[in-house]
Image (spheres, rainbow, N blue to C red):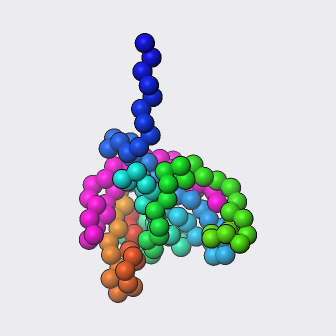
Amino acid sequence: MNKEPAAEGPNVASLRFVLHEHFAKHHHFDFRLEKDNVLKSWAVPKGLPEIPKDRRLAIETEDHQLSFIRFTGTIPEGEYGAGEVKIADAGTYRQVVWSREKIEVVLSGQRFSGTYVFVPFKRAGRGQWLLMKKG
């Protein structure tokens, strides 16, 4: 007797992430972490930091559906986010801390691996974070 495939959804052992490179009006990166059956998302203008302690602005954006994790293609002119979207990196992550004061995750991607930390950038305003790679 064949078992039914497992439903697609969060699994603590295999939460996924994707880093989209977005060639929109302003070139930037969209960093997305699977959590609570959605992709929590941040626009990261300069991409993920590659050097420990390097700080990057991460602007919280709307959640996306899980199916968006595989998206590549062109968003048509006239639509929000118009432009080309490519996957810059993808993989899995392990959550260490997730609170209003700190998000810490361990990425296992093809290009980006290691511990990344978000902390609120309070002077910049609500939904603004600093994203750093731990050493």
Question: Depth check: 114 or 126 in front?
Answer: 126
Residue at the extreme top of the image, as rendered: 1
> Does 109 appear in magenta?
yes
Residue at the image position 40 percent from the left and 77 percent from the top? 128
Q: Position of residue 4 (x, y in %)?
A: 44, 25
Instruction: Give the position of the C terminus as an image quadrant.
Output: bottom left
Percent across and percent down for residue 65 are: 50, 54
User: Does 114 lie within the magenta span?
Assistant: no
Q: Is residue 32 above or below residue 8?
A: below
Whether residue 65 is visible, yes or no, is: yes
Residue at the extreme bottom of the image, as rendered: 123
- The residue sitting at 64% across, 60% down in the picture is 85
Q: Nearer the viewer, residue 60 or 19?
A: 60
Residue visible at 41% across and 43% down?
9
User: Residue 21 in the image: x percent, y percent?
Assistant: 60, 62
The residue range painted magenta reads 84-113
| Residue in front for this viewpoint, 79 or 71 | 79
- Residue at 38%, 68% in the rendered image: 132
Residue 106 visible, this orientation: no
Task: Tally the marks.
Answer: 0
> On the picture, is 81 further left or further right than 31?
right
How far across and down, in percent of the image, does residue 86 sit? 63, 57
**Residue 1 sits in quarter:** top left
Magenta region, main secondary structure: strand
Instruction: Residue at the far right: name it.
Output: 77
